Image: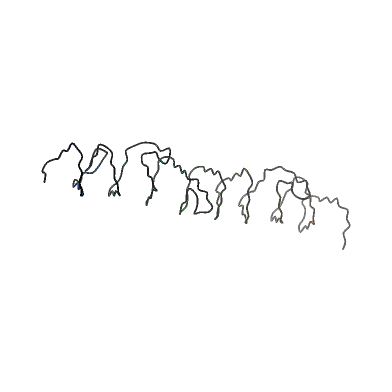
Amino acid sequence: TLRGGLGVEKNIITGGEVEIQSTDNSQDSSTGALVVSGGLGVGANGNFKGKVAVEDTTQSSSTTTGSLTTAGGLGVKEKANIGGSVSVESRAESYNANTGSVVTSGGLGVAKDTHLGGDLDVAGDAVVSKDLSVMYGLVVTQETTIGAKLEVQDTTKAGLSDGTAAAAVIKGGMKVSEDSIFEKDVQIDGELNIAGTFGRSLIVNDTTNAIN
C-alpha cells in the first residue's frame, strides 16, 4: 500500500486487473482519472459508462479517413446528428424498399432539392404539393386525379388519321362534364353523337344521306 504517488520510468506489465479508483471526470484529453500522453491500444472490448469525445478534427474523405474510423460496421441505437455531408460509397442497387445503399425502416424527410440519377419507383401514393416538371416521358399505369388545370404545351398538330401525331393522344374514350372550346379544326373519324346544342354553327362537309 502506497500513501503517495508512484513514478515508474519503464514499462509495467501486470498479470491481473488494474483498477483506478479516482472519480475525476474528463473535460478534455489532459484531464480525467486516467491520462495517457501517447496512444491507447486495447485488444478486446471497451465499455464506457459516460460520453466519448474525440478532439481530433480530421476531415473524412473515404472510409479509412476521419476523426473516427471503424474496420467493421457501426450500430447506433438512438438519434444521430451529423453537421456535415454524408457520403455512402456502397453501389448496391435498389429493387424494393428493403434493398439499396441506404435503407430506412421509417419515412424520409428532405428539406431541400433532391436529384436522382436513376429510376424512381413509388409503391404507395405520391403527393406533389407544387409544380412537377418531367423532362422526359411519364408513364402512369393506374387512375390519375388532377385537382387543377392540366396544360399541354406541346404544339404538335393532329394530322394523321391513325392518331400518332398530336399534342395529346387518348387511346380510349374521353368524357367532358363542362363546356369545351376548340380554337382550331376538329376532325372526327367516327360517329358524333350530340346530346346538347352548339353555341356556334356546325359545318358538315360529308354529303352522305341519312337513312331512317
Residue occupying image coordinates x 28% and y 39%: 39
Q: Nearer the viewer, residue 142 or 184?
A: 142
Quadrant the C terminus occupies: bottom right
Q: Outermost residue toward the bottom? A: 212
Return the x and y of residue 164 as percentages of the image width and height. Answer: 74, 48
Q: How is the image coloured?
A: rainbow
| Numbered-mark total | 0
Residue occupying image coordinates x 72% and y 43%: 156
Residue occupying image coordinates x 29% and y 42%: 41
Q: Nearer the viewer, residue 33 or 116?
A: 33
Residue 74 is left or right of residue 151, and the answer is left
Q: Nearer the viewer, residue 4 or 135?
A: 4
Q: Is residue 195 above or below residue 60?
A: below
Return the x and y of residue 112 as percentages of the image width and height. Answer: 49, 42
Q: Is residue 91 above or below residue 192?
A: above
Residue 99 is left or right of residue 83, and the answer is right
Return the x and y of residue 26 as percentages of the image width and height. Answer: 25, 42
